[in-house]
Image (tube, coloured by chain):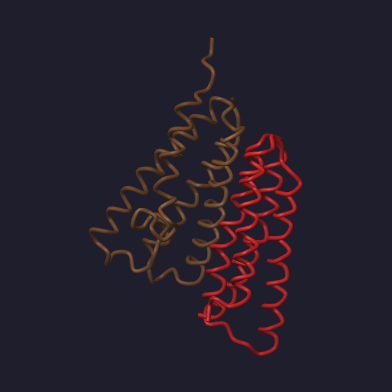
Chain colours: A brown, B red
Amino acid sequence: MKRNQGLGRILVMVYAVFALSAFARSLFQILTDFSSAPLAYLLSAFAAAVYIVATFSLARSGRTAWHVSLVAVLIELVGVLGVGLWTVLDPGLFAEETVWGHFGAGYGYVPAVLPVIGLAWLLTHRPAPTR
Amino acid sequence: MILDGWFWAGTVICALSLIICVVMTVIRTFPDDASILSLVAVELFLVVYGISAAVRTAGGETMSGPVWEFWGYVATALIIAPIAFFWAVTDKTRWSNLVMGAVGPTVFVMLHRMQVLFLG
C-alpha cells in the first residue's frame, strides 16, 4: 500500500490537527503575551513549524517527501523528549505551557506518541529503490 | 459552570460522530454518507454555538477569557470538519471513515477550551 493512503491518511489527519492547533495557539501566544514566556512560545512556534512540514511531507508521494518526513518526525521525537525532560527538570524556565512540555501531557501525550507512530509508519513504508 | 447544556449537546454530537465513523470504518470499504453527515452535524453545532455566543456577548454577557482567543477557537474548529472531509474523500477507502472520525474528539477538546474561555 502506498505511504499516503489507507492508514497513512489518518496519520496525516492527526498531524494536520496538531499543525493547525499548534500554529494557531503559538500565533496567539506570540501576538498577545510574548514577553511572559518567550522561550516557551518560541518552542511552540518551532513545534508548529515541524508539524506543518510533517503534515505536508507525509501527504506527498515520492522519495524526497519520505526523507523530509523522516527528518521532521525525528526532530519531533527529539523535541518532545528533550523539551519534556527540560520542563520536568527546570520548571521555572517555562512559565507557560508549550506543546512539547511535560512530554505533551497537556495534549493527552499525543505529541509523544505521534512521532513514534510516524517513525514506524515511515520505516515500514520506504520509498521504492531507484534502479 | 463550564459543563452546561451547550457542552453536553456538543459532547453527545462529537461522541456520536466518532462512534458512527468507527462503525463505518469496520463495515464499509468507502467513505459512507453516515460519516459525512456526522461531520455535517458537528459543523452545524459549531455554527449554532458560534451564533449563540455572538448573541450572548452582544446581549451583555462577558467572557472570562480573552475574547479573540475564544473566536480563534471557534474559527479553527469550524475549518477542521471541511479539511477532514476533503482529505477523506480524495482517497476512497475504509480508512476515509476513520479520518473523519478524528473530527469528533478534536472538536470536543476545542469545545471544552471554548467553554473555559467563555464561562471560566
Q: Residue placed at 28% from the left, 53% from the top?
A: A85
Residue B30 rendering spot, x and y as whole percentages: 71, 36
In this rendering, position of residue A107 left or right of residue B22: left
Q: Quadrant of residue A11?
A: top right
Residue A79 rendering spot, x and y as whole percentages: 36, 47
Q: Quadrant of residue A37?
A: bottom left
Residue A86 rendering spot, x and y as whole percentages: 28, 55
- Front in this rendered view, residue A10 or A69: A10
Task: Determine whether A121 is above or below B119 in the image.
Answer: above
In this rendering, position of residue B26 left or right of residue A76: right
Residue B93 rendering spot, x and y as whole percentages: 68, 34
Locate the C terminus of chain A by quadrant. top right
Task: Determine whether B104 is above or below B9 in the image.
Answer: above
Q: Residue placed at 62% from the left, 76% from the top?
A: B5
Q: Residue placed at 56% from the left, 56% from the top?
A: B105
Q: Residue placed at 55% from the left, 36% from the top?
A: A58
In this rendering, position of residue B11 left or right of residue A26: right
